[in-house]
Image: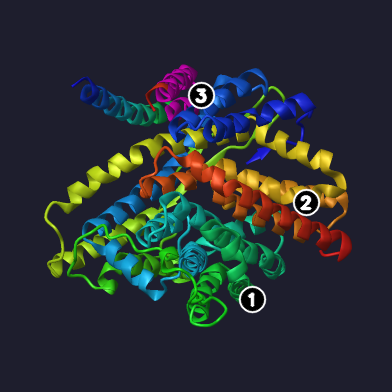
């Protein structure tokens, strides 16, 4: 049962990573094209660092 | 487009610039990490170096990362749609029928490898490219009985000769664009220089298939087929039809291989033990379809690809595209990144993904009319495609992000400048390795040409040697280098069920590519210093 749960958890995390990549794309693009809103680009970058770290752990 | 003329180069900087690639290679080949982990680690290293060593601020790094995501979308749409198409055909029994039919053409594994993995994969590269040859041919070879790792390795090396003139000429046009050398000059020149790589990729395919015994047995056949393909490719380029040079060469090569398989040049000797002959793998139950119905989506794919390249169609569909605008930037070291419009533009008629979607939809319709469509197959195929492509999606995205961070912070230019600076008279030998590096990190011969084409030309001018030869060598190196591009490897491994084993394929393919590129470099050195080529 634990093994099945672990597989499901991994699949769930993999799905989250994919969604996070899409979300980061929107955040980064909005940030780099709106020079008045530089903090959005920074937030996107931080979010991408978290996503990449999660991918190293989850894959 | 970036300008790196003001970059100050020190050995330490050069070493640091190469670090993300070293991390990528070590984690993939030595530590055997999966592509998503490799890409993520390499991107994190590139970001850290970009900020702390190469003077990129957080906005510039965010900009490069966003551009990486744009570019990966361009590649991923091809992976998603081609894997979906393959799964759709597979679920209807079509792949089994295609594999059985092709396997019946010849039962000799060497001829199968040369016919399907070398000539036919070159033809598909000529027509489509962007990873489709790997997605189409690798599973066919598995069905013919080749082990998956061997099948992917054969196709990766086997189609590499066709990349520059492939994809209906996209890389060929890009090298013209960045160097300003007209097509009638560089086309035939490059086609002559391609003769050696064409023949050597044939030998590499034979070696991967069956070691030195296959090389020995296939020598005469490979030389005849290789020279035929090289001549056809040169003829097409000379006649101003360079955009179909690979397609024609691959087609003529496939027919020549099939003919030679019936002659002493390739025919399997009767003395060979039948146990050596690979038996096609039976993976599916019988299907009411014949070969042509099974191959229907690929007929559509090829036809639509050709139609999309007709000048009238191109004119009528001008403006039917989607791409994003990005501002420029500058590092504190003075590396300039120019603003771009329509970045990673997806053309709704010319891009492979819409073509693959249209081919799938047309096939779906015809199968439905002929009552061949299986109920619920669409959703089942979608689920299977998600399972196969979720990991590669993260892998491709992070690796392309790394490539763009390297490019936009000046790391890539630093690397290339360093190679050019230390090589001197040996530059022609190193020149194709720069092209190879570009393809490796961007996954595309076209991108490699855009990135390094001008650098190669400037270096050739500075050294006073053949500009046309070195521009050609850049593209040939890029063509061969695409055989080790992680983005393409991921297409191959994900489609034959080897996801996570990209390192194994890379280890198999890398030595062949390094050797072929070395031969290309030696050829260029001889051409410019001994024969005084332009």
Chain letter of mark 3 equals A
Residue annotated with mark 3: A35
Q: How many circles with numbers are drawn on the protein?
A: 3
Q: Is residue B207 above or below residue B390?
A: below
Q: Few, some or many C-alpha atoms within 10 Å of disc 2 (few <14, some 14-19, many ≥20)? A: many
Q: Are marks 3 and 1 on the same chain?
A: no
Q: Residue at x 81, y 48 (%)?
A: B427
Q: Nearer the viewer, mark 2 or mark 3?
A: 2
Residue B66: % across, % down: 48, 32
Residue B231 - label: 1
* Placement of the N terminus of chain B among the 4 image quadrants: top right
Q: Is residue B185 left or right of residue B497?
A: right
* Closer to the camera in the image, B197 or B191: B197
Q: Are marks 2 and 3 in contact (CB under 8 Å)?
A: no
Q: Is residue B262 above or below residue B416?
A: below
Q: Which residues are magenta?
A: A28-56
> Is residue B94 within the magenta segment?
no
* Placement of the C terminus of chain B among the 4 image quadrants: bottom right
Residue annotated with mark 2: B429
Q: Are marks 2 and 3 on the same chain?
A: no
> Is residue A46 within the magenta segment?
yes
């Amino acid at each position: 049962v634990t093994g099945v749960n672990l597989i499901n958890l991994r699949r769930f995390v993999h799905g989250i990573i994919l969604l996070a990549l899409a979300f980061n794309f929107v955040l980064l693009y909005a940030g780099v094209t709106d020079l008045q809103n530089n903090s959005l680009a920074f937030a996107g970058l931080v979010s991408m660092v978290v996503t990449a770290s999660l991918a190293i752990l989850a894959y | 487009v970036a300008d790196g003329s003001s970059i100050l180069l020190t050995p330490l900087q050069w070493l640091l610039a190469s670090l993300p690639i070293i991390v990528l290679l070590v984690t993939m080949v030595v530590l055997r990490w999966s592509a998503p982990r490799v890409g993520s680690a390499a991107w994190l290293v590139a970001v850290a170096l970009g900020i702390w060593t190469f003077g990129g601020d957080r906005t510039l790094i965010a900009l490069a990362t966003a551009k990486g995501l744009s570019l990966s979308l361009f590649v991923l749409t091809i992976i998603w749609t081609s894997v979906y198409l393959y799964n759709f055909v597979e679920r209807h029994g079509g792949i089994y029928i295609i594999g059985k039919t092709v396997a019946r053409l010849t039962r000799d594994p060497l001829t199968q490898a040369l016919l399907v993995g070398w000539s036919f994969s070159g033809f598909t590269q000529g027509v489509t490219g962007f990873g489709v040859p790997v997605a189409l041919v690798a599973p066919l070879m598995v069905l013919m009985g080749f082990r998956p790792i061997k099948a992917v390795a054969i196709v990766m090396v086997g189609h590499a000769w066709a990349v520059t003139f492939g994809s209906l000429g996209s890389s060929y046009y890009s090298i013209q664009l960045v160097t300003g050398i007209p097509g009638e000059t560089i086309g035939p020149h490059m086609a002559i220089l391609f003769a050696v790589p064409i023949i050597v990729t044939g030998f590499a395919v034979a070696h991967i298939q069956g070691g030195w015994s296959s090389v020995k047995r296939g020598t005469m056949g490979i030389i005849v087929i290789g020279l035929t393909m090289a001549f056809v490719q040169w003829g097409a380029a000379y006649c101003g039809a360079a955009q179909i040079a690979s397609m024609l060469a691959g087609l003529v090569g496939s027919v020549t291989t099939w003919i030679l398989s019936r002659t002493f040049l390739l025919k399997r000797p009767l003395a060979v033990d039948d146990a050596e002959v690979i038996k096609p793998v039976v993976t599916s139950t019988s299907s009411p379809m014949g070969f042509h119905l099974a191959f229907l989506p690929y007929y559509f794919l090829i036809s639509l690809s050709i139609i999309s390249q007709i000048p009238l169609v191109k004119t009528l569909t001008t403006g039917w595209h989607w791409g994003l605008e990005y501002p420029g930037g500058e590092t504190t070291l003075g590396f300039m990144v120019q603003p771009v419009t329509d970045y990673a533009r997806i053309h709704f008629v010319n891009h492979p993904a819409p073509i693959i979607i249209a081919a799938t939809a047309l096939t779906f319709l015809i199968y439905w009319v002929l009552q061949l469509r299986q109920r619920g197959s669409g959703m089942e195929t979608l689920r299977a495609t998600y399972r196969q492509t979720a990991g590669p999606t993260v892998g491709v995205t992070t690796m392309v992000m790394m490539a763009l961070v390297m490019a936009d912070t000046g790391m890539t230019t630093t690397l290339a400048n360093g190679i050019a600076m230390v090589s001197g008279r040996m530059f022609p030998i190193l020149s194709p390795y720069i092209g190879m590096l570009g393809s490796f990190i961007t996954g595309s011969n076209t991108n490699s040409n855009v990135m390094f084409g001008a650098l190669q030309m400037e270096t050739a001018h500075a050294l006073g040697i053949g500009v046309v030869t070195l521009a050609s060598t850049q593209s040939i190196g890029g063509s061969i280098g695409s055989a080790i591009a992680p983005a393409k490897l991921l297409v191959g491994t994900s489609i034959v069920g080897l996801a996570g084993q990209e390192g194994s394929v890379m280890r198999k393919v890398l030595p062949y590519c390094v050797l072929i590129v070395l031969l290309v470099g030696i050829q260029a050195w001889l051409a410019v210093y001994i024969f005084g080529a332009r």
